[in-house]
C-alpha cells in the first residue's frame, strides 16, 4: 500500500466529520475532503512528517469549508440582489403598463369628446392644446381675428368641460403646457 492510501485510510473519516461541522451537508463534506486529498496528491505534500501532515490536512479542510461558505454567501447575496432587481423591474413594468393603459383610455375619452365638437371649436382646441400654438398664432393660421379665436376656444373648452370628468378636463388643459415644454426642449 502506498503512503497516499495509508494517509487516506487514516484521516478520511476524521476529516469528513470535521468538515461536516462546518457545512452540515454530507455530500458537500465528502466533496471538500476529496478536494483536500486531491490537493495533497497534486502538491506532493506526502513528504511532510506525520504531525505536520495531520495539521496541514485539518487546516486545509477547514479553509476549504470556510472558502465554500464564503462563496455561498457571495452567491446568495448576488441572487438576492438579482431577485430584488427583478422584482423591482417587474413592479415597474406592471405599474408602467397599468399607467399607460389608463393614460391610453383617458386620451381616447378626450379625443372622443373633442371629435364630438363643432368643426370651428375642434380646430381651435387642437391647435391650442395639441400643437401648443398661442391664440395670436392660431388667429394668423386661420386668418381670423384673435377675439374670434378666444371666443371659439372658450366655447370649445366649456363644451368639453361638460363632456369630460374633472380629471380628464385637467389632463386636456395640461396638454398645452406639455406641448410648450416639448417645443422649448427641441429648440
Image (spheres, helix red, strand yellow):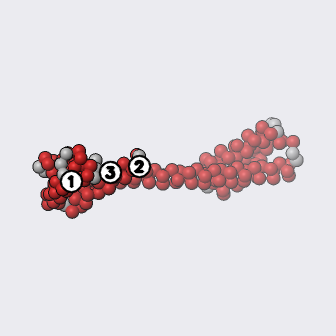
Judge by depth and name the residue closer to the eye, 145 or 131: 145
Q: Residue 179 — which label?
A: 3
User: Which residue sits at x=13%, y=47%?
Assistant: 119
Q: Secondary structure at mark 3?
A: helix
Measured as percent of width and height from the top left, residue 121 is found at 15, 51
Q: Which corner quadrant holds the N terminus?
A: top right
- Per the image, the residue denoted by label 1 is 146
Residue drawn at x 82%, y 39% is 44
Q: Looking at the picture, how far across and down is residue 162, in whole percent?
A: 14, 60
Task: Check whether the beta carbons of the residues at disc 2 and disc 1 lie within 8 A of each other.
Answer: no
Say few, some or many: other residues with alpha carbon within 10 Å of mark 2 (under 14 / 14 to 19 / 20 or more): few
Mark number for residue 166? none
Question: Which label's residue is closer to the chain start, 2 or 3?
Answer: 3
Contact flag, marks 2 and 3 (Cβ < 8 Å): no
The picture places residue 181, in percent across and down from the top left corner, at 37, 53
Percent position (x, y) of residue 113? 16, 52
Nearest to viewer (mark 2 / mark 1): 1
Mark 1 falls on what kind of element? Answer: helix
For the question of whether residue 13 can be seen, the reply is no
Mark 1 crowd level (few <14, some 14–19, many ≥20, 10 Å Cα): some
Q: Earlier in the sequence, mark 3 or mark 1?
A: 1
Q: What's the CA distance linking mark 3 and mark 1?
A: 21 Å
Residue, disc 2: 185
**Residue 46 quadrant:** top right
- Identify the mark nearer the N-term, 2 or 1: 1
Count the labels in the image: 3
**Front one among 132 and 90:** 132
Alpha carbon separation for disc pair 2 and 3: 10 Å
Mark in the foreground, 3 or 1: 1
x 48%, y 54%: residue: 84
Q: Is residue 48 above or below residue 69?
A: above
**Which residue is at the front of the view, 131 or 26?**
131
Amino acid at each position: 500500500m502506498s503512503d497516499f492510501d495509508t494517509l487516506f485510510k487514516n484521516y478520511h473519516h476524521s476529516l469528513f466529520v470535521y468538515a461536516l461541522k462546518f457545512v452540515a451537508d454530507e455530500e458537500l463534506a465528502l466533496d471538500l475532503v476529496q478536494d483536500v486529498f486531491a490537493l495533497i496528491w497534486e502538491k506532493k505534500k506526502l513528504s511532510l512528517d506525520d504531525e505536520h501532515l495531520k495539521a496541514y490536512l485539518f487546516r486545509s479542510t477547514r479553509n476549504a469549508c470556510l472558502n465554500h461558505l464564503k462563496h455561498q454567501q457571495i452567491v446568495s447575496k448576488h441572487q438576492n440582489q438579482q431577485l430584488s432587481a427583478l422584482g423591482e423591474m417587474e413592479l415597474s413594468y406592471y405599474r408602467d403598463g397599468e399607467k399607460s393603459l389608463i393614460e391610453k383610455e383617458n386620451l381616447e375619452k378626450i379625443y372622443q369628446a373633442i371629435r364630438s365638437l363643432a368643426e370651428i371649436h375642434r380646430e381651435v382646441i387642437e391647435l391650442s392644446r395639441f400643437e401648443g400654438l398661442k391664440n395670436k398664432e392660431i388667429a394668423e393660421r386661420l386668418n381670423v381675428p384673435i377675439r374670434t379665436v378666444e371666443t371659439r376656444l372658450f366655447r370649445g373648452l366649456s363644451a368639453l368641460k361638460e363632456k369630460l370628468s374633472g380629471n380628464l378636463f385637467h389632463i386636456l388643459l395640461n396638454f398645452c403646457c406639455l406641448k410648450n415644454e416639448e417645443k422649448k426642449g427641441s429648440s
